[in-house]
Image (cartoon, rainbow, N blue to C red):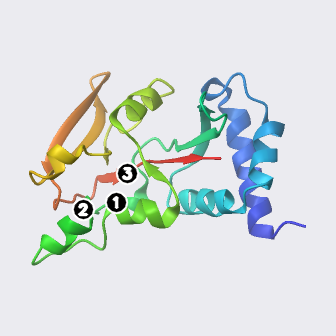
Amino acid sequence: MKHPAQATLLQTLNNRFQQNRRRHPSLAWESVFARLESSPSALVSLGRMEASGGEPDVIGLDTTTGQVLFCDCSAESPNGRRSLCYDRQALDARKENKPEGNVVDEAARMGVELLSEQQYRDVQQLGEFDTRTSSWIQTPPEVRELGGALFCDRRYGRVFVYHNGAQSYYAARGFRGLLRV
């Protein structure tokens, strides 16, 4: 028997899955459910995504591994994951006005990956996300070594990629996670 919180989460995920069939037209909930039942750690991660405002949903399959891909599909960057700098190095470098944390550590704690630039662009094909907010994305080492980090948003019907100091943080910038199940 499932814990009541797990049952509620599974019902929420099923409802979202059914309401957003365009994100995963060739997948059946039964196959997604079977994967979730065999992966308790995935349910924990999805619970954390949901609790922080991510509204996770299935966005497809990894064609190489066959894994089901979940991503935060909230209209704006998840509210419970904003005002964070990029990584631990950036957080440690701030001497004052430090944010509460950083996206790299928070994603790891949640058991999810930060989206790459291409994954962010792919998700934008499924809807219009981050039209008033922005989301940190995976930053190439060569950019990070110079003190920067990358983030994206959608404005004017286009996806934009920007850079900022990795130590910066803003109330309207968070991150979207990707979970493989």
Residue 148 in percent (x, y) is at 14, 50
Residue type, label 1? Val
Q: Residue at x 41, y 44 (%)?
A: 76
Indicate whether 17 appears above or below 169: above
How far apart in space, not on screen, are marks 1 and 3 (Cα)?
7 Å
Indicate whether 119 appears above or below 48: above
Please, which residue is most extreme toward the front here?
Answer: 64
Image quadrant where one finds the N terminus = bottom right
Residue 3, quarter of picture? bottom right
Residue 20, quarter of picture? top right
Q: Nearer the viewer, residue 104 or 19?
A: 104
Q: Report helix, strand or loop for mark 3.
A: strand
Crowd around label 1: few <14 · some 14–19 · many ≥20 (10 Å): many
Please, which residue is most extreme toward the right here?
Answer: 1
Please report contact status of discs 1 and 2: CB closer than 8 Å, yes or no.
Answer: yes
Residue topped by disc 2: 85
Q: Earlier in the sequence, mark 3 or mark 2?
A: 2
Q: Residue at x 17, y 56 (%)?
A: 166
Left or right placement of residue 27 versus residue 114 in this view: right
Residue topped by disc 3: 175
Q: Nearer the viewer, residue 163 or 108?
A: 108
Please, which residue is most extreme toward the bottom here?
Answer: 96
Please report contact status of discs 1 and 3: CB closer than 8 Å, yes or no.
Answer: yes
How far apart in space, not on screen, are marks 1 and 2 (Cα)?
6 Å
Residue topped by disc 1: 103
Residue type, label 3? Phe
Indicate whether 65 appears above or below 54: above
Residue type, label 2? Cys
